Amino acid sequence: MFTTFLKIRELCHDDSKLIMSEVKRLTLLRRIRSLLISEEKKINNWIPRSLIETLLYLADFSPRPKVNSCIISDALPVKQKREYSYSVMVPCYNEEGNIAQCINRIPDLQRDYEIIVVNDGSSDRTAEVVQELMVNNSRIRFVDNRVNRGKGYATKCGLDLATKDVLVILDADMTVMPEDLPLFIAPFESRHAEFVNGTRMVYPLADKAMGPVHMFGNTIFSLIFSYLLNQKVTDTLCGTKCMFRKDYQRIVMKDEAWPDFDLLFGASQLNLKIVEVPIRYQPRISGESKMKTLKHGLMLLTASFKGFLKLKLKFGIS
């Protein structure tokens, strides 16, 4: 949808208006009927109005206050775009079946960019595969940690070594497609964002991309974070997040298992302009998910409680 809005804006004059008709949600009775009658077309997803307005804003439209069932937006003068350099950081643990394809599928960003791969003590051939790729790809910088310390530690190692203006985290499992990276850098260059968070909860999920337990957990944490950050957040655990390096250097990262919460909390404390970009979440091609439902669920709940103390009660906890 974001790409569609961008293309529409290219066709507009500065005094143009975009009018979108808003379809009402199905009533409970019709939802039940749709489950029972297979012939009726089922609706797979609903994009929240707040996210539609964010995407319109990123595409240089200004949504007006709600008018009945329509969303009316005025075309804004397009800001002069800025060009940044990028550090694409790929943390990986036992991803020998994915890492080569992940790196090779990173598109040419048409900018100055580097690829930082951090091996988090893999027991398979992940390190060897990356070293083979480095022979023909001078953009790759490789960190080979011999001991497994967790994704948070690996992420911090990579981001600390980055040298470019904007930092981009890309998971090696390709559940977020490397080809989608231009969608994440566009808000920086149009000066609409200072922190970009991917969201998997808008488009219909591919089969086996996310189980029902993880879906439920993600929904709960999204509600918690929307409250803590004072803005709507639809996905807290999408691995792809982007920020300016100068802002990252002011964020304290302590969670060695899961870095997402530290980064979101830090962005909120710095009062950064946070926007979400929807992506089409894919099932991993090879290997197993590193998310352990019970173990990491408890850790994330603990992190949420610390976030509550830090952001809402202003306690300086460690």
Image (cartoon, helix red, strand yellow):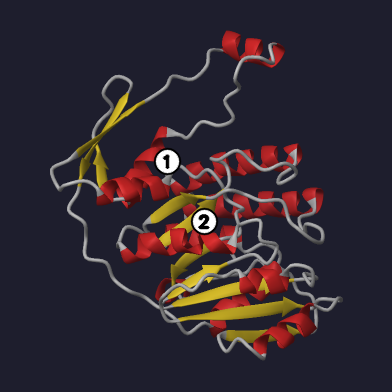
Give the spatial CA distance, label 1 vs label 2.
Answer: 27 Å
Please determine whether, in this image, residue 18 is positioned above or below residue 102: above
Residue displayed at 74% across by 37% down: 212
Q: How many marks?
A: 2
Query: For mark 1, does the 10 Å Cα neighbourhood hold few (<14), some (14 to 19), or many (20 or more) residues?
Result: some
Q: Residue furthest right?
A: 123
Q: Nearer the viewer, residue 114 or 28?
A: 114
Residue identified by numbered label 2:
310
Please determine whether, in this image, residue 119 is positioned above or below residue 270: below
| Mark 2, secondary structure of its residue | helix
Q: Left or right: where does residue 247 sit relative to residue 168?
A: left
Q: Left or right: where does residue 166 sit relative to residue 133?
A: left
Residue identified by numbered label 1:
51
Q: Which mark is drawn over residue 226?
A: none
Tell me which label, 1 or 2, sits earlier in the chain. Answer: 1
Residue displayed at 73% across by 69% down: 150
- Residue 194 sits in quarter: bottom left
Image spot of residue 56 (x, y percent): 33, 44
Residue displayed at 59% across by 80% down: 116
Image spot of residue 84 (x, y percent): 36, 75
Question: What kind of residue is marked 1?
Answer: Leu
| Mark 1, secondary structure of its residue | helix
Residue displayed at 48% across by 65% down: 242
Question: What kind of residue is marked 2?
Answer: Lys
Image spot of residue 193 (x, y percent): 36, 59
What is the quadrant of the N terminus in the image? top left
